[in-house]
Image (spheres, helix red, strand yellow):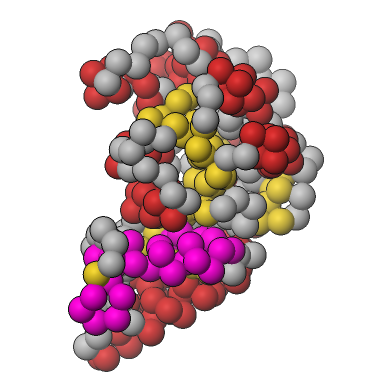
Amino acid sequence: MINIASPIIGRKERKLIKEVLDSRILASGKYVAQFEQSFAKYSGAKFGIANANGTTSLHTALLMCGIKSGDKVVTTPFSFIATANSILFCGAKPIFADIDPKTFNINPVELEKMLKKERNVKAVLIVHLYGLPCDVDAILKLKKKYKFKLIEDSCQAHGAEFKKKKVGSFGDAAAFSFYATKNMMTGEGGITLTNDEKADKYGRQIINHGRVGHSTHTVLGYNYRLTNLAAAIGIAQLEQLENWIEKRIATAQKYNEAFKGLNFLHTPFVPKSCRHVFHQYTVRIAARERDRFMKYLAENGVGSGVYYSSVIYKQPFYKQLGYKSGVCKEAEKAAEEVVSLPVHPLLSKANIDKIIKVIKSYKK
C-alpha cells in the first residue's frame, strides 16, 4: 500500500535528539529558543512562540489577539475541528462563512456578507487549507474596512506563499502545527507567530501558566510548552522543508498533467498569486462515486483520505450548540466530494507512476 502520508526521520533528527538526551535538559530550553527563531525568520515574522501542538497554537493566537468570552469570530466550516474549537476555548462564538469551491478556502465575498450581517465581529480566523494560501489581498482589504483582528490558521501551510510572501506573516497572529504528518513535523508541536512585541510577551505567559519570572503569575495561563526533544526534531526538519516542498510541488504537477481530460476527476486549482505547498493533493469526484473510487484505490494498493467528510457545524457537538445545516452550501458540497491522494516526499518515481496508472484505469 502506498500510504497517504509518511513522516521522514533522518540522521540529523537522530543526532540532535541524542544531543538533547545527553544534555539531560528535556523540557523547554535552548533548542526551543533556536527553533522559535529559525521558524519565525523562515516565515517572515518577528516572533515565534513554540508550543505543544497546532491546537494550542491556535488558542494562544486568539488569546494574544484579545479574544474573550462573548466575542464573535468568523471562520471557515471546512477545516479540522480544532479551528473552531480554539474559538470556543476562549468563550467566543464561531460564525461560519462559506468557501470558494475552487480553492476550498474562505470566500472573501461570503466573508463580507457575514461581516455585514454580524455586527461587532472581533476577529477573522482564516485557514490556508491543504497548503494553499487564502486570497490575502481581499481579506486584508476587509480587515481595513471592518477593523477586525486577523488570525492565520497555517497548520497545513508551512512555506506557502501569497505573492511571494510566506503565510503566517500577514495577520495579527498565526498558528502552525508540527503534527507527525505535516509537511514538517516534531511529532506533536506547534508555533504561534506574531509581529507584535506586546503580543509575543503575552503569548509566552499564556503557554507557561501566566508566569513572569520564576514564581509570579499575572494572567491565566496554560501548560502549552514545547520540549527540547520536539524542538530538536523541528530544527532538523526545517533545514529540509524547502526540498520537501519542491518534491510535493513536482509530484502535484505530474498528477495535474496526467489527469488532464479525466472527466470524473477535478484536479486542484492554484491561483497565479499563490505557492501551494500541497500538504494534501485534493481532487474532487462526484459524491456518488467517492466511496467506490476510494475502494478501487485501496484494492490497487493506493492509499487515500477524505479531509474533511463533514463541515464543522454539522458535527454532533456543534449541533448541540444549536448550529444548523445548510448555512455554507459550497463547503457542504465539497465535504461530499473531496479525496486526497499521496503526495509526500518519500514517494518514488515507481510509486507516482503506479498512482497515475491506477487512477487513469478507473472505470466509472
The one nearer the camera, 276 or 82, is 82
Q: How many numbered badges does the structure rendering display?
A: 0
Which residue is pictured at 47% across the width and 13% down the height? 327
Q: Is residue 270 left or right of residue 354?
A: right
Residue 54 visible in this rendered orientation of the protein: no
Residue 209: say if magenta: yes
Query: Residue 114's spot in the image, x, y percent?
Result: 56, 22
Quarter of the image where one finds residue 356: top right
Query: Residue 235's spot in the image, x, y percent?
Result: 46, 74
Q: Relative to 131, does residue 221 appear above or below in the rendering?
A: below
The one nearer the camera, 215 or 7, is 215
Quadrant in the picture for the N terminus? top left
Quarter of the image where one finds residue 259: top right
Magenta residue span: 191-216
The one nearer the camera, 295 or 225, is 225
Residue 177: say if magenta: no
Which residue is pictured at 45% across the width and 9% down the height? 326
Residue 113 visible in this rendered orientation of the protein: yes
Which residue is pictured at 46% across the width and 59% down the height? 192
Q: Is residue 10 left or right of residue 43?
A: left
Q: Is residue 3 left or right of residue 157?
A: left
Which residue is pictured at 62% across the width and 57% down the height? 169
